[in-house]
Image (cartoon, helix red, strand yellow):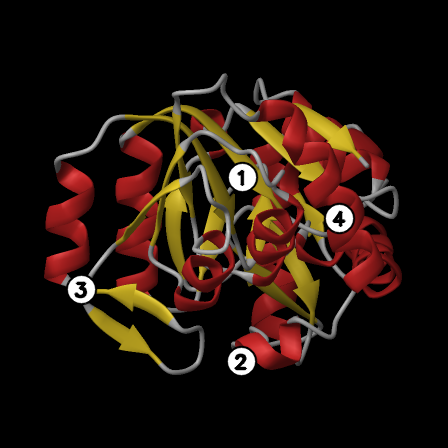
Amino acid sequence: MYAEERQLAITTEVSQRARVSVAQLARRFDVTTETIRRDLAALDRAGTIRRVHGGAVPAGTFPRPEEALGTRLETMTAQKEHIARAALTYLPPAGGSILLDAGSTTGALAAMLPRDLALSVITNSLPIATTIAGLPDAALHLLGGRVRGLTRAAVGPVALQSIDALLTDVVFLGTNAVTADHGLSTPDPEEAAIKRAMVTHAGLVVALADSGKLGHDALVRFAEATEIDVLITDTGADPEEAESLRAQGIEVVMA
């Protein structure tokens, strides 16, 4: 296939799939990844596609604005409940400890925690802390810091300093975007710093992400795909995206 024909086919592929990776295109057209990168560079200059980290999206595609927590609580609620229920499997035994990241799906998990939960629960989320405070046997620790109004999450140096003193059994992470190439990412640098610290201070890293987050990148990466032990998503996840993540060594659970 000539380069012009391949590039036309790549443009069609990108428009149909919304996002494709370099690796996927290399397999599709049986060429090297270097050849695909040259094709994408040419198409990007021509304005027919837009290059992103590790792949391409249709021309005119821009990162989605960060949604407020209230909006996210009303989006894909059934899927988030399925994900949260599956996450209960990864709770440590009584007497253990968990970090609960801020977010709508981690909030769904907090709401499902058993009444007799006998764990230390650390969170930077005001809504999640309110939920956990109603559990009589849970030891709640709320991280301090500046609270972002958009996500109601504590961020900044005070929160980071608190996490640095911890070593928890499990962290349940929220994320705005997940790809095999770029890992987990979020629009805000301060939230990314908190999430990054949580990843490095937990024995088991469990990411909770509905299928709408897979195949997308946000501004700031806070974890490589290889740093995630388990990703729990819903059955609407793109099978190829799921396989790409499994190839990074992640246990992908479709709830």
Q: Quadrant of residue 253?
A: top right
- Mark seen at residue 156: 3
Residue 77 vs 162, above or below: the answer is below
Report the Cα–Cα distance between label 2 and label 4.
44 Å
* Mark closer to the chain start, 2 or 1: 2
Q: According to the image, label 4 marks what residue? A: 3
Query: In the rendered view of the protein, which quadrant contains the C terminus?
Result: top right
Evaluate if marks 1 and 4 touch, with contact meaning CB atoms under 8 Å apart. Answer: no
- Mark seen at residue 68: 2
Q: Quadrant of residue 189?
A: bottom left
Viewer-nearest of discs 4 and 3: 3
* Mark closer to the chain start, 1 or 4: 4
In percent of the image, x 50 and y 55: which residue is there? 134
Residue 250, image x, y percentages: 60, 23
* Mark closer to the chain start, 2 or 4: 4
Amino acid on which the number 2 mark rests in the picture: Ala
Evaluate if marks 2 and 4 touch, with contact meaning CB atoms under 8 Å apart. Answer: no
In percent of the image, x 67 and y 44: which residue is there? 21
Amino acid on which the number 4 mark rests in the picture: Ala
